[in-house]
Image: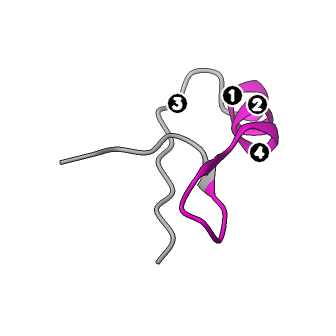
Amino acid sequence: MELYFGVLDKNNNIDEKNLNVLLKCCDNLDVTFIEP
């Protein structure tokens, strides 16, 4: 099973900008967003 940490764009790639925002806002949390 693959886990994606961050927000996936329409091409199912991790959006690095959103990932950085998540890391800053949720520094102590493991947040996984998987969009269809």
- Contact? badges 2 and 1 (CB < 8 Å): yes
**Residue closest to the far left:** 1
Q: Residue at label 2?
A: 20
Q: Secondary structure at mark 2?
A: helix
What is the spatial separation of the Cα atoms under label 4 and label 1, in whole angstroms? 9 Å
User: Local crowd at mark 1 within 10 Å, few (<14), some, or many (≥20)?
Assistant: some
- Give, as a three-letter code, the residue at label 4: Asn
Q: Residue at label 3?
A: 29
Which numbered disc, 3 or 2, marks the residue closer to the eye? Answer: 2
| Relative image position of residue 19 (x, y in whole percent) | 69, 38
Which numbered disc, 4 or 3, marks the residue closer to the eye? Answer: 4
| Relative image position of residue 15 (x, y in whole percent) | 70, 47
- Contact? badges 2 and 4 (CB < 8 Å): yes
In the image: residue 30, left or right of residue 9? left
Residue range of the region highlighted in magenta in the rendering = 8-25
What is the spatial separation of the Cα atoms under label 3 and label 2, in whole angstroms? 13 Å
**Residue closest to the far front:** 11
The residue at 50%/40% (across/down) is 5
The residue at 46%/78% (across/down) is 36
- Give, as a three-letter code, the residue at label 2: Asn
- Give, as a three-letter code, the residue at label 3: Leu
User: Local crowd at mark 3 within 10 Å, few (<14), some, or many (≥20)?
Assistant: few
- Contact? badges 4 and 1 (CB < 8 Å): no
Does 21 appear in magenta? Answer: yes
- Contact? badges 4 and 3 (CB < 8 Å): no
Which numbered disc, 2 or 1, marks the residue closer to the eye? Answer: 2
What is the spatial separation of the Cα atoms under label 2 and label 1, in whole angstroms? 5 Å
Instruction: Name the mark on residue 18.
Output: 4
Which numbered disc, 4 or 1, marks the residue closer to the eye? Answer: 4
Q: Residue at label 1?
A: 23
| Relative image position of residue 28 (x, y in whole percent) | 57, 21
What is the spatial separation of the Cα atoms under label 4 and label 3, in whole angstroms? 15 Å
